[in-house]
Image: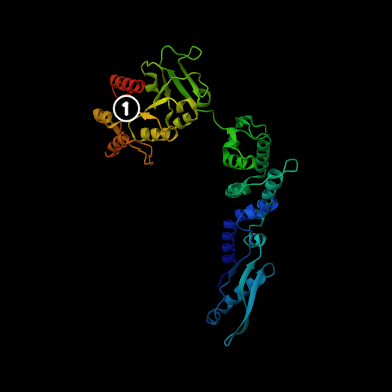
Amino acid sequence: MLSVEEARTKARRCYEKRYPAWAVHTIAEALQQAGDVACAPDQWSIGLKPPTEKEVLQDHLQAHAWADSWRRTAEAFSVDFAERSWPSVGTQHVPLKLTLANAGEIAAFADCSRHWETCLQRTKAFATKLVAPRDHAARTLSPADLARFERHVSSLVSLPEDDWQRLCDVLRWLQEHPSAALFARELPVRGVDSKWVERHNRLVWDLGEALTSQPVRIRLKAPTQFRVRLLDEHRSVCGLRDFAASADELAHLHDPPRTVVICENLVSLLTLPPFSEVLGMHGAGYAVGDLASIPWLRQARVLYWGDLDSHGFAILNRLRSHLPHAESVLMDPATLCAHLDLCVPDSTPTTAELDHLTALEREALCTLLSHDPALRLEQERIPYVFCCKTLEKAVNVGGT
């Protein structure tokens, strides 16, 4: 015998699983795009596992109490009954099946009515006030955008009312300024600051992109500053040969050198020797991928010098995924073997798949990981004279 509370629990699971899809269908209906979503709110039914004659005889009080509980439930919800004629207990009117006709009934039976009302209210507001507001031309959401909204339905419903209103204000502002690039601190929405945007960044970014059809360009943090040294003693930028700039600013560097040496560690950059027509740059660890946005790096010869350890190769792998022509220097088996005594244990080696390494780089990495524990050889531990000679040879090879 399935009790009313057990049925409520099952209904609640059904509701929690399906309500985001129902919310998306509500949006699609409001936008006359119902054909773009998979399913509408449908009925849900469940068998009540009525007792057998034997079970009634064993505990007729429990059986009657169970049937009475479903009779009371039938006053508000659809419960199918059937007559059972049993020789020992006579004719009984037995509940067989509960049927809930739509999303509202499922939510009500599952004690989720308030949650569903909030969901409907916010879903309809999103569709009518943001996607197709009266003062803007009507637009549609792509199936991908509708799927993106579905992923965030639970977050939208759980927002406190004041945060929901702030989110709507932010999304409306983004619609009116789709190309704006600014820090979160600059958003002219009352009650919205950097910390608020950081807490709700996925909602702002994903829903903002769905509404504007372009990436949201709100920054939470200042862009990474990359330390740069012009190693050519005859070159400078406004009299500077050592400075820091963002990748966006470096993209506008006039007449950049033909060769760039990117160093994983700052000290390595600061101690690079002079080279004609060469620029030295600090890669800032895993932020090195940001450098791919610099157009002239795609035409320059790029040498990368990182630590001889798993993370150094992982950073090289990230750089090469953006700049496939990047070459490594001082990250080969010969350099490692010549300084194996200077290695130290690597307590946290990365296990990431590195698909952009050469055969020699993989050999060096395998040597490091073959030890227990794994080893690492930091750039600063390799003798300075050896580094300078190797770098000079690498730079000159490219220049011949």
Farthest residue toward the bottom? 87
Where is mark 1, residue-wise?
A: 330
Q: At which x and y percent is residue 278? A: 40, 19
In the image, residue 33 sits, relative to residue 298, either above or below, namely below
Identify the residue shown where x is 57% and y is 79%.
Answer: 60
Residue 139 located left or right of residue 89: right
Q: Residue 297: name its quadrant.
A: top left
Work out whether residue 29 or residue 122 is closer to the camera in this orientation and state it.
Answer: 29
Give the structural element (helix, strand or loop) at label 1: loop
Q: At which x and y percent is residue 109? A: 64, 63
**How many circles with numbers are drawn on the protein?**
1
Work out whether residue 133 or residue 119 is closer to the camera in this orientation and state it.
Answer: 133
In the image, residue 113 sits, relative to residue 122, either above or below, namely below
Amino acid found under the numbered disc labelled 1: Leu
Q: At which x and y percent is residue 258? A: 42, 21
Task: Please state, as top left, top right, bottom left or bottom right, where the C terminus lies in the image.
Answer: top left
Q: Residue 170: name its quadrant.
A: top right
Residue 124 located left or right of residue 264: right
Residue 378 located left or right of residue 94: left
In the image, residue 88 sits, relative to residue 65, either above or below, namely below
Q: How is the image coloured?
A: rainbow
